[in-house]
Amino acid sequence: MNFSESISTCFRKFVSAKGRASRSEYWWFQLFLYLLSFITIFVDILIFSDNVMENAIFPINTITSLITLLPAVCVFIRRLHDVNRSGWWILISFTCIGIIPLLYWVIIKGTDGSNDYGDDPVKH
């Protein structure tokens, strides 16, 4: 999966946590989110330079982040499904130590063939 396919897939499955997401789908979408955040912060600084520097308010970035929050969470859950983990594991991110296994699971190769959450996304 390439950059544009990943973005279109993640926005097409905007509220769907069903199925599986390959590593490339997940990481390309994360790159898109980081680039989008960088661009919106830059635009906020250009437009609202006085308020941003004094109050650290980034309105465009905040709105963009809220819009992309649900697709980001859903692709994260689908990525957990790819390694045969329940989406409920995302809740351990609220503990400091919980970030370590989550990071490991999004980095490792997904389950070969079908698993409890569907067919292998790499094979399609």
Image (cartoon, helix red, strand yellow):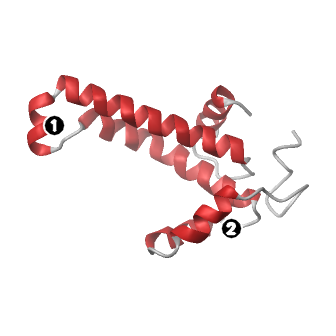
Whether residue 117 is situated above or below residue 57 in the rendered picture: below
Judged from the image, the secondary structure of the residue bearing numbered disc 2 is loop
Answer with mark 2 or mark 1, whichever residue precedes in sequence. Answer: 1
- Label 1: state its secondary structure: helix
Label 2 environment density (alpha carbons within 10 Å; few <14, some 14–19, many ≥20):
some
x%, y% of residue 83?
75, 62
Q: Residue 61: percent from the left, percent from the top?
A: 32, 36
Q: Is residue 104 above or below residue 113?
A: below
Percent position of residue 98, x then y: 52, 73
Q: For the N terminus, which image quadrant?
A: top right
Which amino acid does the dot numbered 1 rest on?
A: Val
Q: Quadrant of residue 66?
A: top left
Q: With 98 as the anchor, is 19 left or right in this view?
A: right
What amino acid is found at the position of numbered circle 2 in the picture?
Answer: Ser
Kindly identify the residue that appears in the image at 89 percent across and 42 percent down: 123
Residue pictured at 85% horizontal, 61% vertical:
115
Residue topped by disc 2: 86
**Residue at screen point 59% across, 62% down:** 103
| In this picture, residue 74 sits left or right of residue 65 | right
Kindly identify which residue carries mark 1. Answer: 52
